Image: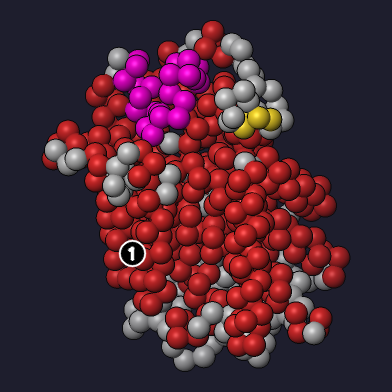
Amino acid sequence: MTDSLLRRKSVLPETQEGSGLARTLGWPHLIALGVGAIVGTGILTLIGVGADKAGPAVILSFAVAGLICACAALAYAEMATMIPASGSAYTYSYVVIGEIVAWVVGWSLILEYSLVVSAVAVGWSGYAAPLLQSWAGVPMALMQGPELGGIVNLPAIGIIAVVAAMLLYGTRESATVNAILVVVKVVALAVFVAVALPAFDAANLEPFSPYGFAKHMGPDGVERGVMAAAAIIFFAFYGFDAIATAAEETKNPDRDLKIGIVGSMLACVVIYILVAVAAVGAVVYSRFANSPEPLALILRQLGQPLAAQYLAVSAVIALPTVILAFFYGQSRIFFTMARDGLLPQSLARVSARGTPVRITIFTAIVVAILAGFIPLGELAALANAGTLAAFTAVSICMLILRRRAPDAPRTFRTPLPWVVGGIAVFGCIYLFVSLPVKTQIWFAVWNVAGIGVYFLYARRNAVAL
């Protein structure tokens, strides 16, 4: 039984008829996919949630989360070039460790990607709702979930439907539109920095860390501290892992994957630090904490309503790039697990255009339901739990292969692998411990259910590897 639980997958992806993905993406598409996924709801919306938990020290929270993510990104880059197959952390775990671990990682990735798509759709709705109300008179009850006194978040559901339609049309076409919208988003953030940074006032940073470093429960029942904020805004940094899911659709994976993963991560670290410093320096953090549109709110408080409206409109136009990137990643994780037999293989069929239609439609239904009714903060926290599990697994896989196959060909080698891998593994564990207790419980429940599905269905239906 132990042997079957730890059976490992061949490095080469399955090539049965009807399950091959079209190779249409180059490194510019991958960098745009990564930047599109990383720069989004995290910086546009969750900076307010992070400021509520850490005060001005949210800047430090961004730095901590960014360091851990950067180390994980280097591990991903090495693994993606060694195993250029769809499935990301799930596939790496299957090849290096074994089936049961791969199932847990894949099950966690399903949770991550589903919740990220839903959370970003809710974050997009936070910017879109005021515009829809002022321009079209749409009732707020139809643009907010029950937790905010509304009925259903229709804008969030609508944008998921639009992105799903784009992915059904074709991967390359979606990636091209994504690249254009990424430029719109980066320009909008550059405008924010240009307007807010000159208003920087050091007095707004005092006290810098009102809630301390480690996570603790505040008198109001809210978990606070630099690490509590980092555990939530960690959500803002990942997205490069979506690039790894594109391995089978990349024209030159040996070259393009490492450029896409490392390049998008470095670009986003610079962008985030600039935006975070400009935000907390321009306005006292308590004035935008927990706002659904913190950056636009800051600009309005600086007496720049036109810049605020430009940022809000740009967010409405460009945030769908994040939804597209993670929706893409989610459908490919589902696709790969179905192709391996761990999920129904009928879901792994692709269209004449090389896109997994059934998986995409099924994913759209699930994430639309979540986005319509679940609040942003809870979605982000639970998504982080799944991501931290995946990042830990990839870093461990990289270290195992450094020991098991030190001379294997590597077109990208992580520098100081044991240091970088150690920071990634233990940093992810620390961030997981810093998540809200309720999130940790729900994550455990999700994985207990997943183990049940594995023994009842997946294990007996896994294809010969």
As drawn, which residue projects farthest toward the right? 403
Q: Which residue is mark 1?
A: 164
The prevailing secondary structure element of the residues shown in magenta is helix
Q: Position of residue 283 (x, y in %)?
A: 45, 16
Residue 123, image x and y in percent? 39, 43
Between 329 and 110, the one lying in front of the other is: 110
At mark 1, the secondary structure is helix
Question: Horizontally, is 331 left or right of 67 in the view?
Answer: left
Residue at 39% across, 41% down = 147
Which residue shows up at 29% across the image and 42% down it?
Answer: 150
Image quarter in which the N terminus is found: bottom right
- Magenta highlight on residue 288: yes
Q: Is residue 192 magenta?
A: no
Q: Is residue 7 visible?
A: yes
Compared with 339, 112 (above or below) is: above
Residue shown at 71% from the left, 61% from the top: 393
Q: Determine whether 281 is above or below 262 in the image.
A: above
Q: Residues within 10 Å of mark 1 (few under 14, many from 20)?
A: many
Return the residue nearer the eye: 380 or 27: 380
Task: Please state if 401 lies on the left or on the right of 320 as rendered.
Answer: right
User: Does 125 appear above or below 387?
Assistant: above
Residue 183 in view, yes or no: no
